[in-house]
Amino acid sequence: MNQFGKVSRFELTAARSKNGRSFIRDSFFTSPFKIMKPFQNEDGGITVFQQSASPGILAGDTQKHSIIVKKGANLEIVSQSFEKIFKMEEGEKAERKISASVGEGGTLIYAPNPCIPFAKSNFVSSTKISLAKGARLIYEDCICAGRVACGEVFDFRAYRNLIEIRREEKLIFRENSFFEGGEKKNLLQSKVSFGEFTHSGTMLIFGFEKTVRDVRKILGLEEKLLYTEEYRRNACGVGKNPSANEKILIEASESDSGDIVVRVLGKSAQEIQGAFQGIRIIMHLQ
């Protein structure tokens, strides 16, 4: 159960100084969260490591995150390690609510490490992000099937994740994922879902000048509409790296608002993280 006996909070506001450098204007956190001193990036932005004194997410945990990026500021948030979601008793759950806003001309890169839902865990997450005019966002989410090396594959009870993004108060993206494992994991392991893969990643790229064609070129994807098993085996690797072909299946598409959504299925979190990192590097060069 939640040993802290209260809602755990993580609040951060980033602003931009007159010399163009981003800095933490305000911060507040309660146990088990901590914030490291930010790293200053060459482009004037900052990278903040979110730390936690807890071994992971326990039954009864409730987390509330508030992230504010002021006009023109550039903030990247990363985590210190993979996030473990521990076993829970029947009827128990843990939850997290993230609220973020990015001001005009600001940039938020939210790239935490993947989460690992243990057997019999039950986790509910919701993320709501508001973008002002000219704001940019990179949002990453990666989930493992569980402790795969220990034989736990989709043995969690449930994993729910809601993502909503608004630009100038207009809803431009909404996704409500619900993975039900345990005795019902057969659907997750079918070809209409994960199939042979054990890891899933989503990368949202909003407000950048790059097009979906640019991103697909970065990933080494060809212009092809019909994806057969043969095509997947021969051309789904990042940058056409033959060693990656059997480990990762990736595709990029364009949303109705003209933003980019990258989906990945893989057999290891490292492969997915590598693909996302390659895209982030290119975006930083804009």
Image (cartoon, rainbow, N blue to C red):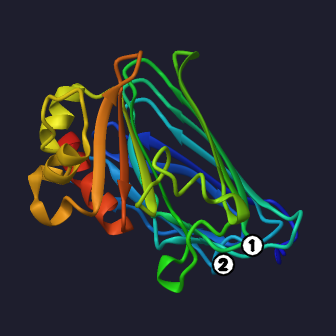
For the residues bearing labels 1 and 2, Cβ distance under 8 angstroms: yes
Q: Quadrant of residue 58?
A: bottom right
Identify which amino acid the numbered label 2 is placed on.
Ser
Q: Does 84 sit left or right of 284 as displayed? A: right
The answer to whether residue 121 is above or below residue 236 is below
At mark 2, the secondary structure is: loop
- Label 1 neighbour load within 10 Å: few <14, some 14-19, many 20+: many
Q: Is residue 259 above or below residue 98?
A: above
Please name the residue shown 87% across and 68% down the image: 90
Q: Nearer the viewer, residue 225 or 105?
A: 225
User: Badge 2, how many Cα within 10 Å: few under 14, some, many 20+?
Assistant: few
Q: Horizontal and vertical percent for residue 269? A: 38, 66
Q: Does residue 179 appear left or right of residue 235 in this picture?
A: right
Q: Nearest the camera: 215 or 9?
A: 215
At horizontal 74% and vertical 71% (from top left) the residue drawn is 120
Looking at the picture, does residue 57 appear above or below residue 220?
below
**Disc assigned to residue 249:** none
Image quadrant where residue 122 sits: bottom right
* Coordinates of residue 284 in the picture (x, y in percent): 21, 44
Q: Position of residue 64 (x, y in %)?
A: 71, 52
According to the picture, the residue beneath numbered tag 2 turns out to be 54
Give the amino acid at mark 1.
Leu
Residue 78 appearing in the image: no
**In terms of depth relative to the viewer, which is nearer, 253 or 79?**
253
Residue 55: x %, y % from top left: 63, 81
Look at mark 1 in the image and give the residue it sits on. Answer: 58
